[in-house]
Amino acid sequence: MEIKELKLRPELAKIGVEIRVIGNDSGEKLSILSGFISRLDRNTPDYGNDTYNDFNTEYYSASANASGGSSGSPVIDQHGNVIALQAGGSSESSSDFFLPLHRILRALKCVQQGEAITRGTIQVQWSLKPFNKCRRLGLREETETRLRLEFPSINGMLVATMSLPEGPADESIKEGDCLKQINGTDISSFITVDEILDSNVGNDVTILIERNGRDVVVVVKVQDLHGITPDRYVSVCGAVFNNLSYQFARSYNLPVKGVFIASPSGSFNIGGSGNDTNCWLLHSIDNKEAPDLDTFIYIMRKIPDKKNVILKYYHLSDLHVYSSKIITIDRHWFKDFKIAIRNDKTGLWDFTVLQENPLEPEIVKPLNAKINDFPIGNGKIAKIASNFVSVECKYKISIDSYYSTNTVETGIIINREKGYVIVSRNCVCHDLCDISINIAESIVIPAKPVFFHPNKGYAIIKYDPSLVLADINQPEFGKMPLEKGDEVTFVGYTSNNRPVIERTKVLDIVSNNIIPVNTSAPKYRGTNLETILLSSKLAVNTETGVLVDQSGLIRAVLLTFDGGDDGNEGCENERNKSLFNCCIDISDIIDELHDLLENDDLQPVINIIDCQFKTISVARARIFNVPEGYISKLEKECREQDKVQFLSVIGLGIDNENKVKCQLQISDIVLSINDQVVSKISDLKIVRCLDKCKFTIVRDGEVVDVTGYTTSYSELETEQVISWSGALLQSPPYGVKQTIKNLPSLVYCTGMMSGSPSKLFTIGQTNFITHVNEEKTPDIDEFLRVVKGIPDNTYCKIRIVSFDNIPYAQTLKVNYHYFPTFGLQRDENKEWKYIDL
């Protein structure tokens, strides 16, 4: 295709010139908008402090009624000459703003001639002010008269609105000064200022200003604008840092110095909302000040992995108040400690590794702590206070549809000798994370997950008990399940770490599946729960707790369950989650605990029926044609306190081959398993150690026997996750297989990195990749084989199927320089390791 050039003619921009804006208005690919230039001296619009704003240039304006999508488009006159560039506009009117071409044309000529594009600054922001405003600032009448005679078309002057502290003109030029001359040249516009400063980088210039009716001459050295424009950044611990830019310093009238936290994430996730998250300036780390990027690099090299350090920082909008936070240095999940330097010849940012391996973590020392008992007369119950700990879980990579975030909840020490703690899977969702426990708000030690229950919504984590010198109570557990009417004491903690103690009674024990499916990204949820209903209202508002009888035996555990995202797509904010509190009988936990104790931390062997059940009444069972003989048998075998009810299938899980292993179907009524009558969820535990079992069911009104297979806990674990073009891909997690009817492939997108090709070209979270360049990608291994043949910076075709089984095709341009392919995979010891791909 023949490319035609457009001529740049900045001198043709005049008031009244008819123009056309050839752009991409509202993303419509090609649009031609018309108007007339109405002003040549408009000040640049202010889009806010925390975003980019032009300054020290005039804008042209016209009523062309352009909207988003046309920024950077040429503004041409009737002869096809480009006289300006579309730069912005008003969302509340038809006004559009154009950038003059004078400095653009100069930069183009420098590039064509292979010359450096020099840019000068004195760190002063000027604004165009009308003469009447200048007179109020002290401008003499004779000055205005002279300038009007020399420049008949102007109606104002450049007035200083800001002189940055510690800049070249600090203390020389003050706010309200009217600019008259630079190096003897009268000034009427920004164009002349730019010409002089860009030609005198490193030199002194003489500036004549008028201040309160008096001429003031100052000599200022012109600074290189490139020198205060960040051309390098450091990536470490999952965060990004660079020197404070002139743009941000100008927005808040600050000296152009300091380490700016450009991406406060990973170890440096210091909070904030909206744009506040990107306006932090680092003061010190590990009690060492970091005034610049080089000092920061030196300090970070000396900090061991996993060390807790004090971070001091402040927000650009409030330098009077320092904030401080204890952070944990993470150099094991976030391995990269590198610097990126802008390469103006290639247009890339060149990476250099600053430290291959971090210093080894410091040895954790045993500590003691004073633990106060619960304020209750029963001494055995009072001692249980020492069993409550705070569990913090830090997730670094999105996996299993969970976001990279931090969670904190209360856990319960269930074995003092081994250091086992039970905690909700709402807190410890998976094992690709860092876990720490806080005992008595005094001792903080690391922990690791050892078991996740596939149904009951709890995890068991383990800490090193030799690190705790405090007197921890060894809890004892009841051997019999709670029954309706039992009196117990509820003890627990609220989310604000306040103890709750109340005598209560068991109202009922119900079998249910109340935890809803996450609508935006299906993830693990508790299913087939048998929950205890209490007369206490306090327990409903309590995060974690236990039910204890008068003998001090723990009879049940109250846990928090993740119930989805309140319908908010991409719910990364924990506050938007719907949470459910459910009380689980200790009999649903004790078997797994015994297995861990007897098998030296080996994961318990546990099999489940991979489907969801609900209970139905005898009346409804008769409608499904359950024979009277089975109803009579159930009535005889049920205990007096048990409800006479049946289990009905309401949901099915599938395996990687899209098969329902249990062989059950929706609406099946289960009468017995291996000839044992079942009427409640707890009866399903008989399959715990079985590979297959016989179901006697009512299907379509007839009694039939079905042989089905159970699903092992080990089949439900995620073993690998890869990052390709910024897309985090894995085999579909259990939460997906609980929900979907058919897996289009085993390449499931669980997340996308910001700024990556996968985000730009929209692979889409919860989607499945079925083909790449028309080659099938049924699983991760085959996907990796196919994408290895795609050259860097080239397009590939991807065929995608959405979670709702809607197929579509997408193209994607890979970029291995910024988004290389890597993976995380479990080794033979079940530890996550990085793998080179």
Image (cartoon, helix red, strand yellow):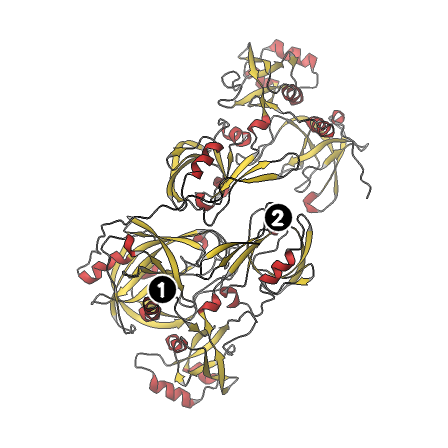
Q: Can residue 31 be seen in this view?
A: yes
Name the residue tied to disc 1. 601
Q: Is residue 271 visible?
A: no
Give x and y (percent) for residue 51. Answer: 55, 36
Relative depth, front residue between 523 and 400 = 400
**Numbered label attached to residue 134:** none
Give x and y (percent) for residue 426. Answer: 41, 59
Q: Quadrant of residue 422?
A: bottom left
Decide: is 552 above or below 683: above
Decide: is 333 above or below 671: above
Give x and y (percent) for residue 688. Answer: 40, 75
Looking at numbered disc 1 in the image, what kind of residue is underneath it? Asp
Decide: is 496 above or below 42: below
Name the residue tied to disc 2. 816
Looking at numbered disc 2 in the image, what kind of residue is underneath it? Tyr
**What residue appears at the point 53 percent right and 71 percent down from the top-left corner?**
654
